[in-house]
Amino acid sequence: MKKKKQKTEQQQVEALRKRCVAKAKKISKRLAKGICAYCGATNRVCHSHHIFSEGLHKGMSADVDNFINLCWLHHLGGLKFVSTKVFSFHGHPTDATIWLEENLPERYQRLKIRSREVFHLGMAYWSKKMEELVELENKLDSANENEINQILYDEHKTGNLGDDAIENEVNRIMEEIV
C-alpha cells in the first residue's frame, strides 16, 4: 500500500482558503435569497461570483461582500460555455465592471480600495477568516428576518472605510495622476 504524502504547509493553507471560500459563497447565496442581482430572477440556479477575482485578490476571495449572486445565465452566459450573445459577467467583464460601478457604487469603491491592501495569507489569516465566517453563519442561523437584514447591512456597510475615507482615497489618487 502506498503511503499518503503529508501536505506541505502551502497546500494546507490553500485547502483552508478553499474551505473559507466555499463557506463565504454559501453565506452569500443565503443572504441573496436566491435572487439574481443583475436581473432579479428567482427561478434559475444562482452562482456566487467574485466581484474582484479570486486569482488576483486571494485575500478577498472569502469576503462575503466580494460575492454577487447571479443566475447561471448572467454569470456564465450559457449552460456549457461562455456565450458572447447574452450579457454575462464572465463573457463581458468590462461591461460587468461598469454595471457594478453604476448599480453598487459604494460597495464597488470599498472593494476597490480593499483590493489594494496587502494581506499576509498564512494559516493564521485563514483560520481567523474561518472563525469570522462560522460566527456570521451562526448569527444567521439564530436570526429572524429583521436581524438578517441588519446582518446584511452590517456586512455591506462601509465600516472603517466610510464615505470620508473613500473620498480621501479618491482625492489622493487624483493628486497622483495630476
Image: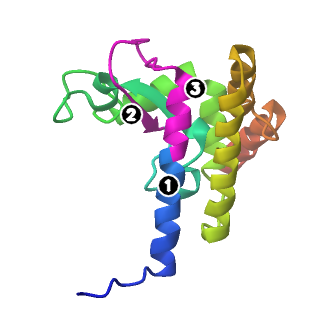
Viewer-closest of 158 and 135: 135
Name the image quarter holding residue 89: top left
Residue at (72, 34) in percent of width and height: 139
Viewed as shown, does residue 107 lie left or right of 91? Answer: right
How packed is label 3: few (under 14 Cα within 10 Å), some, or many (20 or more)?
A: some
Q: Is residue 101 visible?
A: no
| Image quadrant containing the N terminus | bottom left
- Where is residue 35? Give x, y as percent: 46, 17
Residue at (55, 42) in percent of width and height: 24
How packed is label 1: few (under 14 Cα within 10 Å), some, or many (20 or more)?
A: some
- Where is residue 68? Give x, y as percent: 49, 30
Gap in Å between the C-alphas at discs 1 and 3?
Answer: 18 Å
Name the image quarter holding residue 165: top right
Name the image quarter holding residue 105: top right
- Please state the extent of the stretch shown in magenta in the rendering: 23-50
- Between label 1 and label 2, give the one nearer the viewer: 1
139 to 134, vertically: above or below? above
The residue indicated by pointer 1 is 19
Viewer-closest of 64 and 143: 143
Residue 31's mark?
3
- Where is residue 62? Give x, y as percent: 55, 48
N-terminal label among 2 and 3? 3
Residue at (68, 38) in percent of width and height: 138
* Amino acid on which disc 3 is placed: Leu
* Amino acid on which disc 1 is placed: Arg
Viewed as shown, does residue 19 lie left or right of 134? Answer: left
The residue indicated by pointer 2 is 94
Let me know if residue 143 is in the magenta part. Answer: no
- Between label 2 and label 3, give the one nearer the viewer: 3
